Amino acid sequence: MRFTQPRLPYAPDALAPAISQETVDFHYGRHEATYIANLNKLVEDTEYADMPLEDIIRTVDGALFNNASQTWNHIFYFFQFSPSGRREPEGRLREKIDETFGSFDDFKKRMEEAGASLFGSGWVWLSTDEDGKLFLTQGQNADNPLRQGLKPILTFDVWEHAYYLDYQNMRASYLHALWDIIDWDIIERRYEA
Ligand code: MN
């Protein structure tokens, strides 16, 4: 197996009530495990077997892209949470959020609206470019801002499998609850990297 699934740095029940243990077990334990298994099958004995995951995402289409991007996206999503992290951005990223969106509260509202208004399955992203500018974007299905030359720093998964066990059809409630588990130390490190 070339691509392996990293162990989460928190207990499976640590994100409750925002995300239940049952959802972590199904979403990370089963959905993500399936994407990684599919990805490994698709790259086996091909020119992609030694390609970095980000390069596959940037350059490939079809089933390989879908499974590569879903593999990356879910690790990125689950590793931005912690049960006891800092819940507000500070420093340079905070300044940039205030400058770009008006305030942290306005940014949160915009991110939730982007998630609620995305039709069907996909992801909402906060990304940055080489100049440190911020971009709030929606992507259908497995899409990833790496394909637009941006560097993602925060994402909300809006596929139904991300919230249906906990919130049924109430996607907006799920999106709102995610702020309770985002660790801004991690987001700031991604921004400054
Ligand atoms: Mn998902």
Image: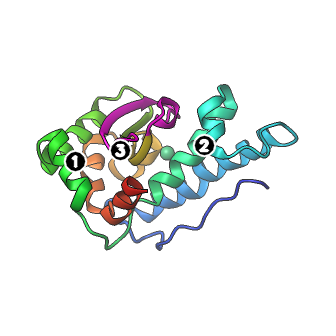
Residue type at mark 3 is: Gln
Judged by depth in the image, the label closer to the viewer, 2 or 3, is: 2
Q: Position of residue 24 (x, y in %)?
A: 48, 60
Q: Secondary structure at mark 2?
A: helix
Quarter of the image with the N terminus in it: bottom right
Residue 147 lies in the magenta-colored region? yes
Residue 81 placement, left or right of 141? left
Q: Residues within 10 Å of mark 2 (few under 14, many from 20)?
A: some
* Residue matched to label 1: 96
Q: Earlier in the sequence, mark 2 or mark 1?
A: 2
* Span highlighted in magenta in the image: 128-150
Q: Secondary structure at mark 3?
A: loop
In the image, residue 113 sits, relative to residue 176, either above or below, namely above
Marks 1 and 3 in Cβ contact (< 8 Å): no
Quarter of the image with the C terminus in it: bottom left
Quarter of the figure with residue 2 = bottom right
Residue 87 placement, left or right of 51? left
Residue type at mark 1 is: Lys
Judged by depth in the image, the label closer to the viewer, 1 or 3, is: 1
Of the numbered discs in the image, which one, if any, rests on residue 168?
Answer: 3
Q: Position of residue 117 (x, y in %)?
A: 28, 29
Q: Does ligand 1 reach within 8 Å of label 3's beta carbon?
A: no
Q: Earlier in the sequence, mark 2 or mark 3?
A: 2
Distance CA(mark 2)–CA(mark 3): 32 Å
Distance CA(mark 1)–CA(mark 3): 34 Å
Quarter of the figure with residue 28 = bottom right
Marks 2 and 3 in Cβ contact (< 8 Å): no
Q: Position of residue 81 (x, y in %)?
A: 39, 62
Q: Earlier in the sequence, mark 1 or mark 3?
A: 1
